[in-house]
Amino acid sequence: MSPELIKAVRSLCCAIVPDMGFGRDDPYVVAECCISCWSFHEPETYPAFTEYVESVGYPAALGEVQKHVVLL
């Protein structure tokens, strides 16, 4: 993942995790939530993220997002 996408993941976590109930302490659940909300919360990086998913596949992209999840 590019530094821009890593920054977007961290921004997504800061926006999403405080509002999560169940799963807020599980990087996998947070990563899934971040990906599902990406286009809404980070529209400027969404095209780059979708290109990344297309190039590596969803499972690999999910794994990479999990690495950069910030649990608050």
Image (spheres, rainbow, N blue to C red):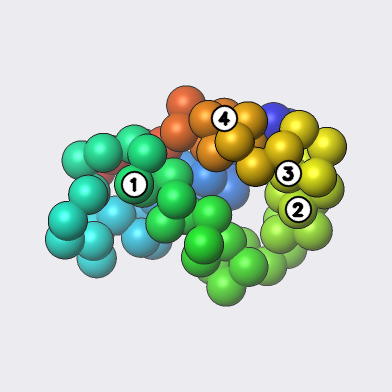
* Corner quadrant of residue 6: top right
Q: For residue 68, say whether it is visible.
A: no
Left or right: 38 as drawn, with respect to 28: right
Residue 71 got which mark? none
Residue 64 got which mark? 4
Q: For residue 42, say whether it is visible.
A: yes
**Observer-nearest of 58 and 69:** 58
Q: Amino acid at mark 4?
A: Glu
Q: Amino acid at mark 2?
A: Thr
Left or right: 48 as drawn, with respect to 60: right
Q: Amino acid at mark 1?
A: Val
Q: Residue at x 36, y 47 (%)?
A: 30
Quadrant containing the C terminus is top left
Residue 40 appears at what percent x and percent y? 57, 73
Q: Are marks 2 and 3 in contact (CB under 8 Å)?
A: yes
Q: Are marks 3 and 4 in contact (CB under 8 Å)?
A: no
* Corner quadrant of residue 20: bottom left
Residue 29 got which mark? 1
Tag 2 residue: 50
Q: Earlier in the sequence, mark 1 or mark 4?
A: 1
For the residues labelled 1 and 3, the Cα–Cα distance comes to 18 Å
For the residues labelled 1 and 2, the Cα–Cα distance comes to 19 Å
For the residues labelled 2 and 3, the Cα–Cα distance comes to 5 Å
Residue 53 got which mark? 3
